[in-house]
Image: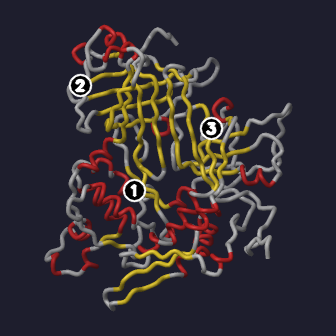
């Protein structure tokens, strides 16, 4: 690579096609590899939007004031060099990053396809920090940004009603029919919300794809009309709160995700999939990872001679497999933090739930206990989630405390949901989410790869003997809940910080009883 060419981007010795573009409708500034210091992109499974920050070099305030320094540091036409901030939530930052094809002598060329490797975001700047410096020659600005579509959703007024869309769109005398006739299945209501809006319908292509958008349950319906002052995001968040998966997936929680673009410069699409549908694509055979297990990591340990572990606790594809990444320099973990479930969280959130609703037809309050008990969510996890991952264990790794077992530790939830299936979102599904995503978690940093994203799996293995009980806990398949991509232009370094969770162990050798542990009796 010619390092004198400032239009080239290289991180960790790998060349990248990289566009960082700041646009306000008039000024169109392309920031090259000396115009910015650092770029951070964060993905979170619980928050569908990508957010992040970028530190831009602005010597002598050159980003906003034309100067010779600007001409040297920014790649753009002279008439577009000066950037004037709009400060109205429409300063648009377009970022597109993908590794360049690799063509090593004697080997076939490796091409990085967009669907898997392209990391692209159209964002808006929601805040600007003028960083302090000792000298005006070293001025920098830090721009904070998030997905543009999210910003627009927070601004736009939204008048939406389930009584006038979907199967209800041709009904007459709406004011004369009952609430049941005005309702839609929750997942269909969300799909209609996206389809009917002229600004957001371009992100709704997957709502007609059965693989990407769950149909929901006919027993989980919603009669909804936007309240006064509702924004689009308010309608979306409310309906997502009560959405459950179809009956085929036992009305479990769904993950609402803004998927990666299938091709550069095309709109990203929203998906809505049951949790267990992700786990179905993880793989549970030792030699056969499925499509959602995209990497296998190995722990770097102090050993003169590495040995093959006798127990493989997560699927591991062959060395020739292109579906699962196993590159030494990218998939070795030198340090990690393993965080187990907090006893405080367990005692407060993984208890029995009592869900109370009001039946207006008979004027009575209804109370449901059995479907929302701790026993139910553990049983559901065993049958629908753990059955799809590689494990030798049949029993749950966590025991019931006597108070939970004897229903003396219970939380009461009052809900307006009128349907029995809809009420699962307030009880059992909350418990299932707590159990899955507040359980055993690992976090580590490694050399960066753009294919890493939330909603995927990675395998973790030791390289030495691994038959101790702690090894059974540490190793295995992790579900990725958080990814932070960190690009540093000063050091030409790119790293990825990853958080993965798993609620299972490979084997429980030491068994605990559910009785209280008493020293003073």
Q: In the rendered view, tell whether residue 491 sits above or below residue 478.
A: above
Furthest-left residue in this view: 173
In the figure, is residue 27 to the left or right of 208?
Answer: left
Question: Quarter-wise, where is residue 322 in the image?
Answer: top right
The percent coordinates of residue 464 (x first, y second) are 81, 41
| Mark 3–mark 1 distance (CA, rounded to whole Å) | 28 Å
Please identify the quadrant where the C terminus is shown: bottom right
The reply to whether discs 2 and 1 touch (Cβ–Cβ < 8 Å) is no
In the figure, is residue 408 to the left or right of 9?
Answer: right
Q: At 35% from the left edge and 73% from the top edge, which residue is drawn?
A: 221
Asked which secondary structure carries label 3, the reply is loop
| Mark 2–mark 1 distance (CA, rounded to whole Å) | 42 Å
The mark that comes first in sequence, 3 or 1, is: 1
Badge nearest the viewer, 2 or 1: 2
* Dot 1 alpha-carbon crowd within 10 angstroms: few under 14, some 14 to 19, many 20 or more: few
| Mark 3–mark 2 distance (CA, rounded to whole Å) | 43 Å
In the figure, is residue 95 to the left or right of 437?
Answer: left
Residue wearing tag 1: 209
The disc at residue 84 is 2
The reply to whether discs 3 and 1 touch (Cβ–Cβ < 8 Å) is no
Asked which secondary structure carries label 2, the reply is loop
Q: At 48% from the left edge and 47% from the top edge, which residue is drawn?
A: 44
């Amino acid at each position: 690579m010619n390092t004198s060419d400032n239009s080239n981007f290289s991180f960790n010795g790998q060349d990248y096609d990289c566009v960082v573009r700041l646009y306000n409708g008039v000024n169109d500034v392309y920031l090259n590899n000396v115009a910015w210091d650092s770029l951070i992109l964060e993905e979170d499974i619980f928050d569908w939007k990508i957010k992040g920050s970028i530190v831009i070099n602005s010597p002598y305030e050159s980003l906003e004031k034309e100067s010779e320094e600007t001409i040297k540091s920014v790649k753009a036409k002279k008439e577009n060099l000066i950037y004037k901030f709009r400060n109205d939530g429409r300063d648009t930052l377009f970022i597109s990053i993908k590794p360049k094809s690799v063509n090593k002598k004697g080997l076939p060329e490796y091409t990085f396809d967009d669907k898997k490797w392209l990391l692209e975001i159209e964002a808006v700047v929601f805040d600007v920090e003028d960083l302090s410096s000792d000298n005006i020659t070293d001025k920098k600005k830090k721009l904070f940004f998030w997905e543009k579509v999210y910003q627009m959703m927070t601004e736009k007024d939204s008048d939406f009603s389930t009584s006038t869309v979907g199967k209800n769109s041709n009904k007459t005398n709406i004011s004369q029919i009952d609430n049941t006739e005005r309702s839609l299945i929750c997942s269909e209501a969300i799909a209609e919300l996206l389809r009917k809006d002229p600004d957001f319908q371009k992100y709704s292509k997957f709502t007609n794809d059965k693989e990407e958008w769950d149909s929901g349950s006919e027993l989980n319906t919603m009669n909804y009309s936007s309240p006064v002052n509702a924004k689009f995001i308010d309608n979306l968040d409310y309906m997502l709160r009560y959405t459950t998966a179809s009956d085929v997936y036992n009305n479990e929680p769904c993950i609402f995700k803004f998927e990666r673009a299938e091709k550069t410069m095309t709109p990203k699409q929203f998906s809505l999939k049951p949790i267990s549908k992700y786990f179905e694509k993880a793989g549970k055979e030792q030699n056969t990872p499925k499509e959602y297990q995209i990497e296998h990591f190995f722990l770097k340990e102090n050993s003169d001679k590495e040995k093959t572990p006798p127990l493989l606790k997560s699927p591991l594809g062959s060395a020739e497999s292109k579906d699962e990444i196993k590159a030494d320099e990218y998939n070795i973990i030198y340090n990690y933090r393993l965080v187990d479930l907090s006893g405080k969280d367990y005692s407060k959130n993984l208890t029995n739930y009592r869900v109370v609703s009001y039946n207006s037809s008979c004027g009575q309050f209804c109370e449901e206990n059995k479907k929302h008990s701790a026993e139910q969510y553990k049983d559901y996890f065993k049958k629908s989630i753990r059955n799809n991952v590689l494990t030798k264990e049949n029993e749950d790794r966590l025991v019931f405390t006597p108070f939970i077992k004897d229903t003396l530790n219970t939380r009461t939830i009052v809900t307006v949901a009128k349907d029995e299936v809809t009420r699962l979102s307030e009880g059992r599904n909350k418990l299932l989410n707590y159990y899955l995503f507040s359980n055993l978690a690992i976090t580590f940093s490694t050399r960066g790869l753009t294919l890493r994203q939330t909603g995927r799996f990675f395998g973790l293995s030791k390289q030495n003997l691994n038959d101790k009980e702690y090894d059974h806990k540490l190793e295995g398949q992790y579900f990725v809940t958080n990814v932070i991509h960190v690009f540093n232009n000063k050091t030409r370094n790119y790293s990825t910080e990853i958080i993965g969770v798993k609620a299972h162990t490979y084997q429980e050798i030491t068994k605990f009883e559910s009785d209280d542990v008493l020293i003073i009796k």
